[in-house]
DNA sequence: TTGTTATTTAGGGAAATACCAAAATAAGTC
DNA sequence: GACTTATTTTGGTATTTCCCTAAATAACAA
């Protein structure tokens, strides 16, 4: 879970997830949305992938990134837990 | 908001918030829960405070930390938004 | 003022992170 | 094979983060 929060800590990576939530996109297509060199973005993708927040699918020469909603939802649950929102035992 | 996600990225800081959610605690009392030097914890507290995730109150010589639930809830909402959970416009 | 307790600030070193340009890899086409 | 396109890996530098010990500050008591 720490991997996930680490990944979420960078604004670029949060924006990548936001973009991927609308639809899967290739690495290059994603990179075009940022004012950063492609290797830099590639590094960010690797962090997201290590946290299992995205998955990849190769289509010929391009690589398509998909957001992994279940992990994003788990992170949200973890944070809700920390915030004491929902699912609480009234003891 | 980036300050908040940065603050949440470190496991020690998440644990501090979890402890403070039960009840406010002094810096020293918190520090005792970790196997780290007090100045190290003080640094973590400063990060949490910069993100407005905690507030402080001095009582004589001790400083009491309180979790700022509203900011924690805002962060949860932001993540829920990223995850597309709840509050969505069906368009 | 001297001393004690609680906490933070200062200073420094090691490790991690973020960025880039250049080179390498992968898949496909001619 | 030679070339093109898409992407990642490598190598390098600069900045930031994390942790420590030692010193400074704050509030209070004797």
Image (tube, coloured by chain):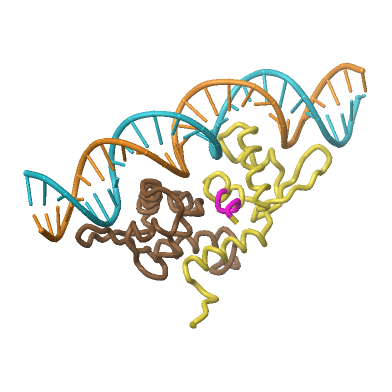
Chain colours: A brown, B yellow, C orange, D cyan
Front-lying residue, B19 or A62:
A62
Question: Quick check: C20 left or right of A87?
Answer: left
Identify which residue, B38 or D18, lies in the foreground: D18
Q: Position of residue A75 (x, y in %)?
A: 47, 60
- Residue at x 66%, y 37% (from the top left corner): B42
List x then y, in percent, for residue A56: 29, 59
Q: Is residue B3 magenta?
A: yes
* Residues rendered magenta in the picture: B2-6
Out of D22 and B59, give the one closest to the viewer. D22
**Residue A62 higher or lower than B16, as above or below:** below
Image quarter hosting the N terminus of chain B = bottom right
Q: Quadrant of residue B78?
A: bottom right
Residue, x 68% and y 51% (percent of image)?
A: B54
Q: Quadrant of residue A91?
A: bottom right
- Residue A48 falls left or right of residue C13: left
Name above or below for residue D2 compared with residue D24. Answer: below
Q: Position of residue B35 (x, y in %)?
A: 56, 35
Q: Main secondary structure of the magenta part?
A: helix
Q: Is residue A56 magenta?
A: no
């Amino acid at each position: 879970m720490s991997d996930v929060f680490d990944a979420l800590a960078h604004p670029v990576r949060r924006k990548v997830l936001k973009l991927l939530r609308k639809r899967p996109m290739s690495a290059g297509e994603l990179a075009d949305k940022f004012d950063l060199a492609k290797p830099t973005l590639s590094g960010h993708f690797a962090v997201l992938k290590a946290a299992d927040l995205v998955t990849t699918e190769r289509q010929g020469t391009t690589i398509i990134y998909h957001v992994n909603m279940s992990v994003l939802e788990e992170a949200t649950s973890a944070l809700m837990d920390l915030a004491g929102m929902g699912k609480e035992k009234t003891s």
